[in-house]
């Protein structure tokens, strides 16, 4: 059932994008605002609040859905949660907007959302696609497979909490610790799938460069920049960099889906 939800969720999120593109997380922003105002005694309170919100919301929603329609109710809730936590923007549409070029509003917005500057070269463009795929696809897929509804919510809400203003330096530090824990296994699997779907030697070199002077296993987001720098030609055009990054993340996603299907066949997933 997990693999079916992932496949359906990825497909429906793309097909129904005009309906789901305005995913609303204002309720979470308001809750975290109350945390800022009333839970300022300890720097770890915001990170704890995210965990508490996820656990309570998941438990309540799962209980109500199961009581309403049993397993089918849970299936619908899990599918809705997975779609809700994907994105929030569609990566394929943003790639098309980047390739459109010019000063079109959708092109400029895609650059702004993906933090790709006008002067970006091909490797930087590819790295922007990698980071977007990590946040929009791979993180949600991994934690949904591992923890189900709470996992998908936890990944998305943790990232959203870091975009809220007015955190103190210590509070932001604890939220970043939580995000590091959530991102680490995702980045490891992204590196493995990038090596299998592309240039294994280049990916291995990027991993080594990332860990130079420290532990190679403290993998952070910046490793994706290294992968892009070593797998995309620096003299390529911006559009070629976008296409190379897009093709790579799709190969990686297909590898993930194949592995999930094999785990399902082996009976390790339900």
Image: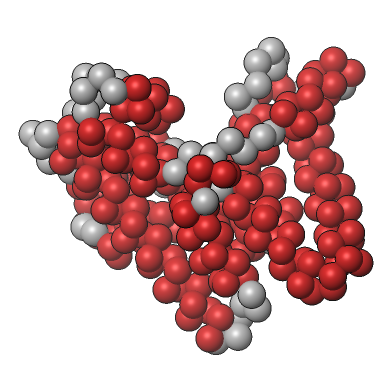
- Quadrant in which residue 157 is drawn: top right
- Quadrant in which residue 73 is drawn: bottom right
Q: Looking at this view, is 237 or 184 the one in front?
A: 237
Q: Residue at x 78, y 45 (%)?
A: 54
The colouring scheme, among rainbow, by chain, secondary structure or one colour, is secondary structure
User: Residue 126's x, y, as percent?
Assistant: 27, 39
Q: Quadrant of the N terminus?
A: bottom right
Q: Is residue 148 left or right of residue 22?
A: right
Q: Looking at this view, is 69 or 238 the one in front?
A: 69
Q: Is residue 221 left or right of residue 4?
A: left
Q: Residue at x 69, y 13 (%)?
A: 166
User: Residue 23's x, y, as percent?
Assistant: 62, 38
Q: Is residue 140 above or below residue 251?
A: above
Residue 209 in view, yes or no: no
Q: Residue furthest left?
A: 235
Q: Quadrant of the C terminus?
A: bottom right
User: Residue 190's x, y, as percent?
Assistant: 41, 54
Residue 161 in view, yes or no: yes
Q: Residue at x 48, y 60 (%)?
A: 11
Q: Is residue 27 above or below residue 112?
A: below
């Amino acid at each position: 059932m997990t693999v079916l939800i992932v496949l359906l969720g990825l497909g429906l999120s793309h097909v129904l994008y005009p309906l789901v593109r305005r995913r609303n997380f204002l309720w979470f922003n308001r809750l975290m605002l109350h945390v800022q105002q009333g839970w300022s005694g300890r720097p770890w309170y915001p990170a704890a609040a995210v965990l508490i919100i996820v656990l309570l919301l998941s438990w309540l929603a799962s209980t109500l859905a199961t009581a309403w329609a049993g397993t089918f109710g849970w299936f619908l809730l899990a599918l809705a949660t997975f779609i809700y936590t994907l994105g929030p923007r569609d990566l394929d549409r943003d790639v098309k907007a980047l390739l459109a070029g010019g000063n079109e509003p959708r092109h400029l917005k895609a650059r702004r959302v993906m933090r790709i500057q006008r002067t970006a070269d091909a490797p930087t463009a590819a790295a922007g696609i990698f980071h977007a795929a990590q946040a929009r696809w791979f993180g949600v897929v991994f934690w949904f497979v591992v923890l189900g509804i709470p996992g998908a919510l936890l990944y998305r809400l943790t990232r959203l909490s870091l975009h809220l203003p007015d955190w103190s330096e210590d509070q932001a530090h604890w939220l970043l610790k939580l995000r590091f824990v959530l991102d680490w296994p995702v980045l490891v699997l992204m590196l493995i799938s990038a090596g299998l779907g592309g240039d294994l030697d280049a990916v291995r070199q990027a991993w080594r460069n990332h860990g130079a002077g420290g532990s190679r296993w403290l993998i952070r987001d910046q490793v994706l920049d290294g992968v892009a720098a070593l797998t995309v030609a620096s003299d390529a055009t911006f559009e070629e960099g976008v296409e190379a990054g897009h093709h790579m993340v799709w190969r990686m996603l297909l590898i993930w889906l194949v592995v999930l299907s094999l785990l399902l066949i082996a009976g390790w997933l339900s």
